[in-house]
Image (cartoon, rainbow, N blue to C red):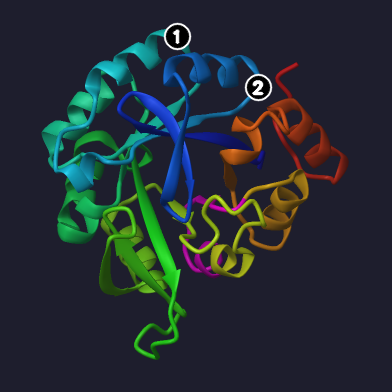
Amino acid sequence: MLKRIIPCLDVRNRKVTKGVKFRDNVDLGDPIEMAIAYSEGGCDELVFYDITASAERRPIDIDMVRKVAKVIHIPFAVGGGIETIDDMYRVLEAGAEKVSVNSLAVKKPAIIAEGARQFGSQCIVLGMDPVKSDNPEFSSGYEITTRGFREFTGMDALEWAKRAEDLGVGEIVVNSVDADGTREGFEVQLTRLISTNVGIPVVASGGAGTPQHLVDVFNEGAADAAIVASMVHSGDYTIKQIKDELAAAGIDVRRNW
């Protein structure tokens, strides 16, 4: 199966922004322009997170979703500020292929099953933000957080992943809070823990800094896809460079050129 490379655009006030461990964000550019550049640059999908929508308890920016859908020709997922089935419908109707739920799913797990019934499991993505914990209550060693790492849930990461799969989610994005924005590598152990215990695609997120980090998370973490942000936003690597190095390492990727 081909491994997917997915740039992540965290959007705040209609600007792409990036921080480290969900803090100290710096604005980087226009999400529409960046979406076009990555789409034309050979990425497989895109993901957009309206990163302050849940914390500010406001709806997602549907106008931005529509504008993105008009200018790119690859699948994209949208998350942040989704509270109801109607919100999911609006996002998909505006042109997104997938809806990512995180805080909402923790608060109302039934929304996963409802969304899967209405739109198909392939449209429903679970975003999870696990953080390392020494508390023996969490057998996986990770606790789920929500609302941009602002709230601790008391939920074990692996138990939550399995439950979400049972509810009908079609894909899980494992975003390591501890590695987010550090560019020091994915949490391979965490990714493998989830990917080897569920039967749906798992996307590694948080920590990508070099193509070797992606090689590691595909080979050792058994990820189906990997999200990249800082390493491409900075201009240090292009999607083509990443895919060339993955192919040289024996990773099957889609070559768009």
Residue 221 is situated, as x and y percent measured from the top left of the image, at: 64, 61
In the picture of the structure, the residue carrying the numbered disc 2 is: 42
Identify the image quadrant of residue 42.
top right
First in sequence: mark 1 or mark 2? 2
Placement of 193 over or under 47, stated as above or below = below
Residue 72 is situated, as x and y percent measured from the top left of the image, at: 48, 13
Disc 2, SS: loop
Placement of 213 over or under 42, stated as above or below = below
Taking the magenta stretch, the answer to whether it contains residue 254 is no
Q: Nearer the viewer, residue 245 or 254?
A: 245
In the picture of the structure, the residue carrying the numbered disc 1 is: 71
Q: Residue at x 25, y 16 (%)?
A: 63
Residue type, mark 1 in image:
Val
Residue 3 is situated, as x and y percent measured from the top left of the image, at: 65, 41
Q: Residue at x 38, y 83 (%)?
A: 138
Tell me the distance, in whole angstroms, between the alpha carbons under discs 1 and 2: 15 Å
Looking at the rendered image, the quarter that the N terminus falls into is: top right
Magenta span: 193-207
**Relative to 41, is 240 on the left or the right?**
right
- Residue 141: give its label: none
**Relative to 113, is 36 on the left or the right?**
right
Disc 1, SS: helix
Residue type, mark 2 in image:
Gly
Identify the image quadrant of residue 13.
top left
**Relative to 239, is 105 on the left or the right?**
left
Give the class, few, some or many, for how many residues have Cα within 10 Å of label 2's Cα (few <14, many ≥20): some
Placement of 125 over or under 193, stated as above or below = above
Taking the magenta stretch, the answer to whether it contains residue 198 is yes
